[in-house]
Image (tube, coloured by chain):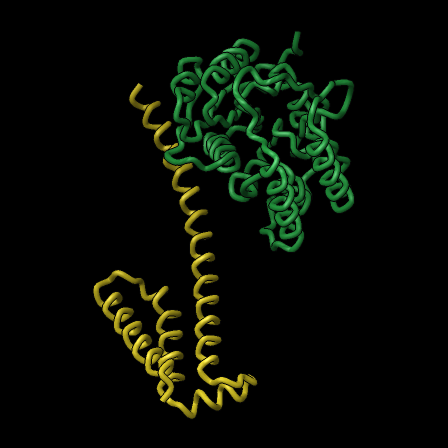
């Protein structure tokens, strides 16, 4: 049984669910979130799906942002953040639309944000006792980026590729304009560091996908490592507008 | 005259003519035409004078002067390509913003109609 979430917190928070062709997954996920936290706004960003993702999410009671063309994960998440900023929400939690992120962990992610202890929260699969299965290549890649990030930023990150991320309004205002492209998770940590935001990880457990295939392929992971490395390198030298301190 | 020089002279004249007609018919924005005009003119100038080409080749240490033409052309092609990639990147960002803004507005309208 998940921890209760205070009503005021629910009303100040929006759950952002990027979804691309997640019919069959998205409906049950939205229903689950709405059952657990009835006062939470649930926004599904339908990234130009060719299936019934949008209709299913709407049916389940979510607000749906339908993107006119496929923008990829970063563009979809950013659309959700922009919605949160526009409607004056204080917090946003991003969960993947495939149901891998357990909504029961929402209070754990929100707690450091509402307590004012940090600006960005990452749900880590490697902290705590949760079991996480993955390929050797993927683990190696993640370990590589963990080393890089911790060396540069001084954060103690264990799971930089996690898409289970919470942000307060200050971080949202920044990310609504400056969310990194392509594979945003790792570069976001660096971007957030260069703005001196406070970041914290909390342990979460992952669930297996309900249906459908993961989008990760072998060539894809090589491309991933290259693009993200380049992005990190560029991020180190990028001039950034001073985010509101 | 080298045959290459004649050909590049003709080609650059045609290129410049095409650029100007495109601007006149508003098919090409002034902003993007500038680089094309500069490169077209540069090739035209270099290929119109045999001596200029020889001097250029000698300065660059190229034994066969018409090769200098190819070098120059390659250089401009690279610059133009880079210019285009920059333009595409900026268009991509703007396109993303538009798609996001459209989705937000669409959602707002749906809310109003309900």
The quarter of the rendered structure image containing the C terminus of chain A is: top right
Q: Residue furthest top?
A: A1
- Nearest the camera: A52 or B51? B51
Residue B43: image quadrant is bottom left
- Hue used for the chain lettered A: green
- Nearest the camera: B50 or B18? B50
* A61 versus A201 height, above or below: above
Q: Residue furthest left?
A: B25
Count of marks placed on residues: 0
- Nearest the camera: B111 or A138? A138
Across and down, in percent, residue A54 comes to 40, 22
Q: Residue furthest bottom?
A: B51
Across and down, in percent, residue B77 comes to 44, 67
Residue A196: image quadrant is top right
Q: Residue at x 61, y 35 (%)?
A: A218
Q: Is residue A130 left or right of residue A220?
A: right
Q: Residue at x 33, y 82 (%)?
A: B6
The quarter of the rendered structure image containing the N terminus of chain A is: top right
Across and down, in percent, residue A183 comes to 58, 39
Across and down, in percent, residue A57 comes to 44, 18
Q: Residue at x 32, y 75 (%)?
A: B11
* A236 versus A143 height, above or below: below
Q: Is residue A204 left or right of residue A224?
A: right
Residue A182: image quadrant is top right
**Chain drawn yellow in the picture:** B
């Amino acid at each position: 049984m998940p921890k209760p979430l205070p009503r005021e917190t629910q009303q100040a928070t929006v759950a952002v669910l990027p979804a691309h062709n997640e019919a069959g997954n998205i409906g049950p996920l939205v229903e689950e979130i709405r059952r657990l936290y009835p006062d939470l706004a649930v926004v599904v960003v339908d990234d130009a799906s060719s299936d019934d993702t949008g209709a299913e999410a709407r049916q389940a009671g979510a607000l749906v942002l339908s993107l006119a063309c496929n923008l990829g994960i970063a563009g979809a998440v950013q659309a959700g953040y922009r919605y949160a900023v526009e409607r004056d929400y204080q917090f946003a939690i991003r969960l993947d639309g495939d149901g891998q992120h357990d909504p029961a962990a929402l209070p754990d992610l929100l707690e450091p944000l509402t307590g004012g202890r940090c600006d960005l929260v990452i749900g880590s699969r490697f902290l705590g006792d949760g079991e996480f299965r993955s390929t050797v290549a993927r683990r190696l890649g993640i370990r590589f980026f963990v080393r890089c990030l911790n060396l540069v930023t001084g954060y103690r990150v264990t799971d930089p590729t996690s898409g289970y991320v919470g942000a307060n309004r200050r971080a949202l205002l920044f990310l609504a304009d400056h969310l990194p492209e392509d594979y945003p998770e790792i570069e976001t940590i660096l971007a957030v560091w260069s703005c001196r935001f406070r970041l914290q990880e909390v342990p979460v457990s992952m669930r297996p996908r309900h249906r459908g295939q993961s989008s990760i392929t072998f060539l894809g992971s090589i491309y991933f490592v290259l693009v993200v490395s380049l992005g990190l390198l560029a991020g180190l030298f990028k001039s950034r507008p001073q985010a509101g301190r | 005259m080298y045959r290459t020089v004649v050909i590049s002279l003709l080609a650059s004249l045609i290129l410049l003519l095409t650029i100007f007609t495109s601007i006149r018919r508003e098919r090409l924005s002034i902003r993007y035409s500038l680089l094309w005009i500069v490169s077209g003119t540069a090739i035209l100038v270099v290929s119109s004078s045999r001596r200029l080409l020889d001097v250029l080749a000698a300065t660059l240490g190229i034994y066969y002067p018409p090769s200098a033409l190819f070098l120059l052309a390659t250089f401009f092609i690279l610059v133009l390509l880079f210019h285009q990639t920059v333009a595409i990147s900026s268009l991509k960002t703007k396109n993303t913003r538009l798609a996001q803004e459209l989705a937000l507005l669409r959602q707002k309208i749906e809310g109003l109609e309900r």
